[in-house]
Structure formats: C-alpha cells, structure tokens
C-alpha cells in the first residue's frame, strides 16, 4: 500500500514539475513514507530521518533540503512528532498527498480532486492499485485503523480508468489492494463488490492478470470466490490472514471470527477453486498466549498446508487496545522460539508443495530480465506463476528473448521452499 502511495505522490509531484533524483543527497525534497505496523519499521524510519537531518545541516541552508514525512507514523495529532523531529518541514497522514503538494506550491491548482486523475507512472509490467483505504475492524493489536482511517472505497469508474491508463503504459498484471479487500464497495451508494470490480476491469485491453490483497475472513463471500473461479484473468491466490488458531486468542485480538468460521471459508475456497494457492499471516506470542494455544497455530498450519506463511512476533503498538489493556507477557526469547518453530514447519510444507510442481509447466508473467550488474550479464529471467510463486529460468539460447510483461511457459526443474527454477518451455502464451 505504501509503495502505491509513494508512486501516486511521485505522479502528483511530476505534475508540479518536480523530478525524481537518484540519491537523497541531490534532492530538494525528501519524502519519507512510513510504516509503523511493527516497532522495527518505526525504528528504521526514525533512523532514516536522522540521516536526512545530518544531510540538511551539512547543506548549511544552501540549497535547502525539505523533509516531508507521510504514512502511518503520522496520526491526527503531530505535536509529539514535531517536538521529536523539529527539522521535518511537513507531516502528512496516509494518502494526504495534497498536504505535501500545497506545502511546496501553496497557491497551486491541483486540478480539483487529486485522486481521480493522478495516475502513477508504471515501473514495470505489474502494478499495485489501492481500491479501498483504511479499515473498520480495530483488531486489538493493530494501529492501521487509527492511522489510515475508516474504510473508503474508490469508485469502479475511477479504478477502471487507472487500470486502463496502466495497461496502455505496459502493465499486464494489477494487484487490487485493500487492508480488507473484500470490504470493497460496502461504503459506496450502489454497493458494488469485489466481484463487480473484477468484472468491470476484466476486459481491459492488454491486461492479462488480476490479483487482490488482503482478504479478511468475515468479508469474504461466495460470490467473490465464484468470480475468482469464473473469470480467467483473476489469479487463484488468496492471502487470508488467520493470525491465531485458538478462539480465546482470536477473541483477545478481536479478529471477529472463530477458528471454525475461518476453516469453513478456507474449505469453501478450496471447494470452489481447487487450484487455489493460499497464504496466511500468523502472530506468535500475543498477550497471554500459552504453549498450548501456540501449539494450535502450529497444528492449524500442518492441517491446512498454506503455500506461504508470514509470521510475526507480537510487538505492542502504542495507541492500540492491546497496548492499553493487555499485558505483553510472553518473553522475547519465547516469542522468537515460537516464530522459528513456525518457520521450520512452514519450510517443510512449502518444500513439499513446491516439490510437487517439479516437471509441470507453469504460465509465468515475465517480470524481470537478465540484470546488467557490474558489467556481467546474468542471463536469468524472473516472474511469477498464477499462484504467485516466484520462478527463475535462464535465458534460452537460440530463441528470441522473452520481453517484460510477456506470458510464457516454464517447465519446473528445481524447487525450494521460496522459489522455483525451470526452463522456458516454448514461445509466448497467446493473449
Ligand atoms: S483487519 Fe485488523 S489487522 Fe487488518 S488492518 Fe484492519 S485492524 Fe489491522
């Protein structure tokens, strides 16, 4: 989401005549787009701001370096931040692009509403497209609803124009983004849903694939799952965070579902879209999590066999309900032990799942070409399968090179838990 926001701001700055520089040392303006979903990310943002402060001081005022901070670090009140980082010139909440643009050019005409008409310039054949901002769920550990506000959907027309603009500029795959992507449309007058949006953009010229992130179990509907099954461009990959498998922990997290309800959705997805790849997110060491409760998470992963698991050790975020009312009582070493236990189990499962792909031929969208690093051509191309698995393959000799955004067939010859290797099987997949 932050990457998409940064690109959008860059497009707005370009409209005002600004250009991106390769190094911060050459910039007149540095925008730090922050994430504070974990303490580590916040510490990194603070560290980077310290580096910019030194750069600003070294310039001795000529030419000045203006520093803007946007994203989740910026809440409704900025007094504390202003006191802590007095050298920052402008603070903007997530997606408050206008605050930065108006700071730079106070009397600029931004063309009315910034959102509908400012489309980022694509950087390659894939693009992220935010379709719903914010979140209404208020899970007890999460800062997102406080920083990104309530759920607000963009209109189908607005999104369809952005998809068309991207595809006219070389994009072949879009990922529709939301914190809870299936909540799309609930706040709009005519209440379209994600399935309507898939259908509306499906036939965009040059578009080959549609992905979506992140699913929230309670917003999932059978209609949306059926649309994934029925629309050929919608990729059969669901990222559906479970976070924990014990009902008391889920209640303490205020996730809004029981593990039985979660299982029901996973089984429904697998019934309707049998080829679906599933990934999930898990938090270990949440307040009060016992060994037995943790074991339930581990058992669930073995039972459901996800393609990918993102695991995080719980860290309290100031301002959240858990930070105010629950005790962070699992010791750090124990959290790390649980995290590593999940990683080990998942590594085994992912190895087995990926090994089963050996000898198969996968449809891959070419996302990167051989890189020219230190003058040496590494003749390896990379892309992803429909189920979002990363694939590398050597440039085929005696064949014309695949091009970025092209869809090709790759026969899988090697597998690891994290990626696949293969050989190009034949020419491009027909559009
Ligand atoms: S669903 Fe929960 S975890 Fe996800 S963004 Fe919303 S509040 Fe945070």
Image (cartoon, grey):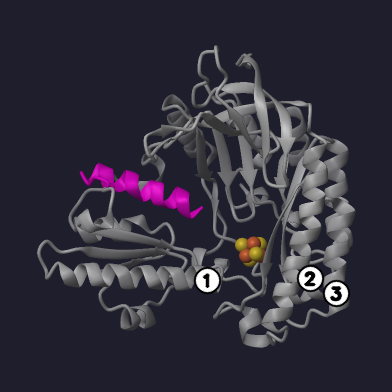
Residue under the image location 26 percent in, 72 percent down = 53
Mark 1 vs mark 3: give the one in front: 1
Image coordinates for residue 159, horizontal then vertical, percent: 50, 38
Q: Nearer the viewer, residue 380 or 360?
A: 380
Q: CA distance from mark 3 to mark 2?
A: 10 Å
Give me the disc on residue 40.
1
Q: Farthest residue to the left: give it.
A: 62
Left or right of residue 236, residue 396 in this image: left
Q: CA distance from mark 1 to mark 3?
A: 26 Å
Residue under the image location 76 percent in, 55 percent down = 217
Residue under the image location 30 percent in, 64 percent down = 68
Image coordinates for residue 287, horizontal then vertical, percent: 73, 81
Image: 181 above or below 65: above
Image coordinates for residue 336, horizontal then vertical, percent: 70, 73
Can residue 141 be spotted in the picture? Answer: yes
Q: Secondary structure at mark 1?
A: helix
Image: 311 above or below 203: below
Q: Quarter containing ligand 1?
A: bottom right
Question: Is 9 part of what is drawn in magenta?
Answer: yes
Name the quadrant containing residue 362: top right
Image coordinates for residue 206, horizontal then vertical, percent: 52, 22
Left or right of residue 270, residue 70 in this image: left
- How crowded pointer 2 is (Cα within 10 Å; few <14, some 14-19, many 20+) is rated as many
Question: Is 258 part of what is drawn in magenta?
Answer: no
Which residue in the protein does label 3 denote? 293
Does the numbered disc 1 mark a residue whose Cβ is under 8 Å from ligand 1? no
Left or right of residue 418, residue 93 in this image: left
Q: Earlier in the sequence, mark 1 or mark 3?
A: 1
Specify start and end residues of the magenta stretch as a single range: 1-20
Which residue in the protein does label 2 denote? 250
Can residue 258 be spotted in the picture? Answer: no
């Amino acid at each position: 989401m932050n990457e998409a926001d940064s690109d959008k701001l860059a497009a707005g700055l370009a409209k005002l005549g600004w250009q991106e520089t390769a190094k911060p040392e050459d910039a007149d303006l540095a925008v730090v787009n922050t994430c504070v979903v974990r303490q580590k990310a916040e510490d990194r943002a603070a560290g980077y701001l310290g580096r910019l402060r030194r750069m600003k001081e070294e310039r001795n005022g000529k030419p000045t370096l203006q520093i803007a901070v946007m994203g989740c670090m910026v809440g409704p009140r900025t007094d504390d931040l202003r006191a802590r980082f007095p050298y920052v010139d402008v603070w903007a909440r997530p997606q408050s692009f206008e605050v930065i643009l108006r700071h730079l050019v106070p009397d600029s005409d931004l063309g009315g509403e910034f959102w509908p008409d400012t489309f980022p310039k694509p950087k390659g054949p894939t693009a992220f497209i935010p379709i719903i901002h914010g979140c209404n769920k208020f899970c007890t550990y999460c800062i997102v609803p406080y920083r990104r506000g309530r759920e607000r959907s963009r209109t189908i027309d607005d999104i369809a124009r952005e998809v068309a603009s991207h595809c006219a500029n070389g994009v072949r795959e879009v990922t529709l983004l939301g914190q809870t992507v299936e909540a799309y449309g609930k706040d709009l007058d005519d209440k379209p849903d994600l399935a309507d949006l898939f259908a509306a953009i499906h036939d965009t010229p040059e578009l080959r694939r549609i992905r979506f992130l992140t699913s929230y179990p309670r917003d999932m509907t059978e209609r949306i799952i059926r649309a994934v099954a029925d629309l050929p461009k919608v990729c059969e990959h669901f990222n559906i965070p479970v976070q924990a498998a014990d009902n008391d922990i889920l209640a303490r997290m205020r996730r809004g579902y029981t593990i039985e309800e979660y299982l029901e959705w996973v089984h429904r997805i697998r019934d309707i879209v049998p080829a679906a790849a599933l990934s999930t997110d898990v938090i270990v060491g949440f307040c009060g999590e016992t060994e037995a409760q943790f074991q339930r998470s581990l058992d669930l992963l073995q039972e459901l066999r996800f393609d990918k698991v993102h695991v995080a050790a719980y860290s309290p975020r100031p301002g959240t309900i858990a930070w105010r009312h629950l005790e962070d009582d699992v010791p750090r070493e124990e959290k790390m032990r649980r995290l590593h236990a999940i990683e080990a189990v998942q590594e085994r499962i992912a190895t087995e799942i990926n090994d089963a792909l050996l000898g198969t031929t996968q449809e891959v969208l070419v996302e990167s070409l051989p890189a020219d690093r230190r003058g040496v051509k590494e003749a390896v191309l990379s892309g992803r399968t429909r189920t979002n698995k990363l694939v590398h393959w050597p440039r085929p000799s005696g064949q014309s090179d695949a091009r970025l955004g092209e869809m090709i067939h790759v026969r899988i010859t090697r597998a690891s838990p994290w990626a696949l290797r293969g050989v190009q099987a034949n020419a491009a997949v027909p559009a």
